[in-house]
Image (cartoon, helix red, strand yellow):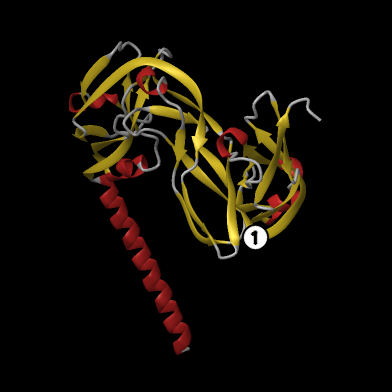
Amino acid sequence: MNGRRKKRDYKTITAVVAIATILWFMVKMSKVYEYTYEIPLQVVNSNPGNCLKYPVPQKVKVVFSGKGENLFRLQFSELTYQVDLSDVKKQMVLRLVDHPEYVQLPAGANVQVKSILRPQEVVFELEACRKKTVPVTPRYEVTPDLGFILVGVQAKPDTVQVTGGHSYVDTLKTVTTTLVKREKASLPFTETVAVQGNPTYWAVYNPPSVELFFDIQRIVEREIKGVNVKVINVPRNLEVVPLPSFVTLYIKGGEKILAEAQPEDFEVIIDFRRDYKGSGVKIPASIKTDLNLLYAESRPLTFELVVKPKGKK
């Protein structure tokens, strides 16, 4: 019986506290208060030939006045401070504090804009608008783990369209990404990163972000046989034959790159004009390839050149 009575008393107390809380909340919500919100600064421009030249503040701090219940509803409303630049040719200096009517309130908000705290004044500078597609340059500090190599970084997409004022867009050659950092990477990975331009100028980047693929591969070694030796810068009246004419390359790099490597991917080049020192003197060759390798070496390292006048047997 005592247990039932205690349980009933607990329910009664809970109900009384809940009713009191509701009554207190209703009283508070019926009083008039002032509350400060940060709302987006929205620029309207119906003239597609003009763009902002420099960035403007993204937020405006506004003090609202009204009943608590109405101020509470503002938290769930879309509020903006709207500035129309459609008729502006070059520049407009706007004192935001003098134009509280630019605050866009939802219908039936029943609140008043009491004041604009900051920014108090904004300079809107316009110039001719341009669009340009430029390549993306990834920014990264990626350190592969021991025994691995970063063989490449690929952006997808690898270009973005930039829209902005001509003084910025006309000189733009590339845009970068936010910095990607990773240590001891042993597996390929992808990061979605934002596109970054020059923060001094206003611009829109489409798309605003790209995916960066970091190709991490295990380091392996391989021999490539039958690579042709080529002699360049030979005088027209001479015929030059390298000995040997085909070599084996010892290469080191990412396992997938080496697995697909072919003799045609390499050039072993001897520069006759620069390196030839006379009959019997062996000279080195240079190895050229578009593959991303750690190391490449020809075997043998040096070559002898057989030189004779052209057409002579």
Find residue 312 and report its image quarter.
Answer: top right
Q: Residue at x 74, y 48 (%)?
A: 247
Q: Can the viewer see residue 312?
A: yes
Q: Position of residue 238 (x, y in %)?
A: 69, 28
Looking at the image, residue 20 lies above or below residue 269: below
**In the image shown, does 296 or 95 lie closer to the viewer?**
296
Give the residue at the far right of this rendering. 313
**In the image shown, does 41 or 130 lie closer to the viewer?**
130
Q: Residue at x 69, y 53 (%)?
A: 300
Q: Quadrant of the C terminus?
A: top right
Could you classify mark 1 by the number of other residues whose Cα lies within 10 Å: few (under 14), some (14-19), or many (20 or more)? some
Q: Amino acid at mark 1?
A: Arg
Q: Position of residue 117 (x, y in %)?
A: 19, 36
Looking at the image, residue 54 lies above or below residue 274: above
Find residue 295 and report its image quarter.
Answer: bottom right
**In the image shown, does 183 or 201 lie closer to the viewer?**
183
Q: Residue at x 36, y 61 (%)?
A: 19
Looking at the image, residue 18 lies above or below residue 68: below
Q: Position of residue 130 (x, y in %)?
A: 44, 17
